[in-house]
Image (spheres, helix red, strand yellow):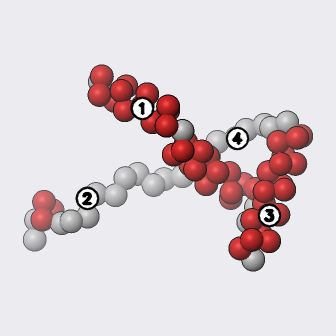
Amino acid sequence: MSVTELKLSKLPDRTPVKVTITVLPELKKTLDDYAALYAATYGQEESVAELIPAILEAFLASDRAFARARRAASAAR
């Protein structure tokens, strides 16, 4: 079977990249509150560090203006 016959395309690079950020105390408290609500909702504790990537992905996926601008920039290349 040749690769072109596969329904699944080649997987993208999934190597994690570490990003370090500094946040203000109020945002840290908000993130801690979110983690507590997540644990109460799903019955499973997750650290803020584990939740932040999912929060960022959800935010970026819901930002329609960003999606349009990104598509336009990609088309211009």
Measured as percent of width and height from the top left, residue 23 is found at: 80, 38
Measured as percent of width and height from the top left, residue 15 is found at: 48, 53
Earlier in the chain: of badge 3 and badge 1, it is 3
Task: Please state if 59 lies on the left or on the right of 71 as rendered.
Answer: right
Q: CA distance from mark 4 to mark 2?
A: 32 Å
The answer to whether residue 17 is seen in the rendering is no
Q: CA distance from mark 3 to mark 1?
A: 32 Å
Residue where numbered disc 2 is placed: 9
Question: Which residue is the extreme one toward the bottom?
Answer: 43
Give the residue type that dot 4 points to. Answer: Thr
Residue where numbered disc 1 is placed: 68
Total residue callouts: 4
Q: CA distance from mark 2 to mark 1?
A: 25 Å
**Mark on residue 54?**
none
Task: Please state if 37 lies on the left or on the right of 61 as rendered.
Answer: right
Nearest the viewer among 68 and 50 is: 68
The structure residue drawn at horizontal position 68% and vertical position 57%, both measured from the top left corner, is 51
Question: Which residue is the extreme one toward the front?
Answer: 64
Mark 3 and mark 2 in contact (Cβ < 8 Å)?
A: no
Mark 1 surroundings: few (<14), some (14-19) or many (≥20) residues within 10 A: few
Q: For the N terminus, which image quadrant?
A: bottom left
**Mark on residue 37?**
3
Earlier in the chain: of badge 3 and badge 4, it is 4
Element type at marker 2? loop
Residue where numbered disc 4 is placed: 20
The structure residue drawn at horizontal position 64% and vertical position 42%, both measured from the top left corner, is 19
Give the residue type that dot 2 points to. Answer: Ser
Measured as percent of width and height from the top left, residue 44 is found at: 73, 74
